[in-house]
């Protein structure tokens, strides 16, 4: 069974940094696009940043400038470095991967990020 396992969330103060990690496990041949989404309380989930298998980057409005997405294709992992965090960055961050083969589009369970002012 293929799954995505996230880590790195937590409670930080405004201005601090966090690094989220997500690794795909199971019988995986490879992964196409990988991404991070955020869902704030009472709001819809939206894109923070995505990265293609070849390294093409795309940032949502909330991620550009302070956040950096990267990936390691050798271990099917994706990372999100978040700098200068603000209270409005608070939410549950979900890892997304388009996995080759039957698994297809897969989501992680989410990791909570809380930024206090």
Image (tube, grey):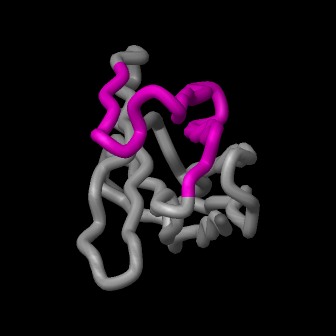
Q: What is the x, y in percent for residue 68?
A: 54, 29
Residue 9 or 76: which is nearer the viewer?
Answer: 9
Q: Can residue 88 be seen in this view?
A: yes
Q: In this view, does 61 lie to the left or right of 97?
A: left
Q: What is the x, y in percent for residue 93?
A: 49, 62
Q: In which quarter of the image is the C terminus?
A: bottom right
Q: Is residue 65 magenta?
A: yes
Q: Can residue 3 be seen in this view?
A: no
Placement of 26 over or under 72, stated as above or below: below
Q: Which residue is drawn at 41% across and 39% down?
A: 63
Q: Which residue is drawn at 67% across and 54% down?
A: 14
Q: What is the x, y in percent for residue 7?
A: 70, 59
Q: What is the x, y in percent for residue 3?
A: 53, 63
Placement of 22 over or under 5, stated as above or below: above
Q: Residue at x 61, y 48 (%)?
A: 85
Q: In this view, does 68 lie to the left or right of 39?
A: right
Q: Is residue 34 magenta?
A: no
Q: Is residue 53 left or right of residue 45?
A: right
Residue 1 or 74: which is nearer the viewer?
Answer: 74
State the extent of the magenta-drawn residues as a range: 57-86
Splitting the image into 4 quarters, where does residue 62 fall?
A: top left
Placement of 68 over or under 48, stated as above or below: above
Q: In this view, does 36 lie to the left or right of 113?
A: left
Placement of 55 over or under 42, stated as above or below: above
Q: Which residue is drawn at 74% across and 59% down?
A: 13
Splitting the image into 4 quarters, where does residue 44 fall?
A: bottom left
Residue 56 or 9: which is nearer the viewer?
Answer: 9
State how many labels appear: 0
Residue 24 or 50: which is nearer the viewer?
Answer: 50
* Extreme-front residue of the structure: 117
């Amino acid at each position: 069974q293929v799954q995505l396992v996230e880590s790195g969330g937590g409670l930080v103060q405004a201005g601090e940094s966090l690094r989220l990690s997500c690794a795909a496990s199971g019988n995986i041949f490879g992964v196409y696009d990988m991404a991070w989404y955020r869902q704030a309380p009472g709001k819809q989930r939206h894109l923070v940043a995505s990265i293609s298998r070849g390294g093409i980057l795309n940032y949502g409005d909330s991620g550009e400038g302070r956040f950096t997405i990267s990936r390691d294709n050798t271990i099917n992992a994706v990372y999100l470095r978040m700098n200068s965090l603000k209270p409005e960055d608070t939410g549950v961050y979900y890892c997304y991967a388009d996995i080759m083969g039957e698994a297809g589009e897969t989501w992680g369970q989410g990791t909570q990020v809380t930024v206090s002012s």
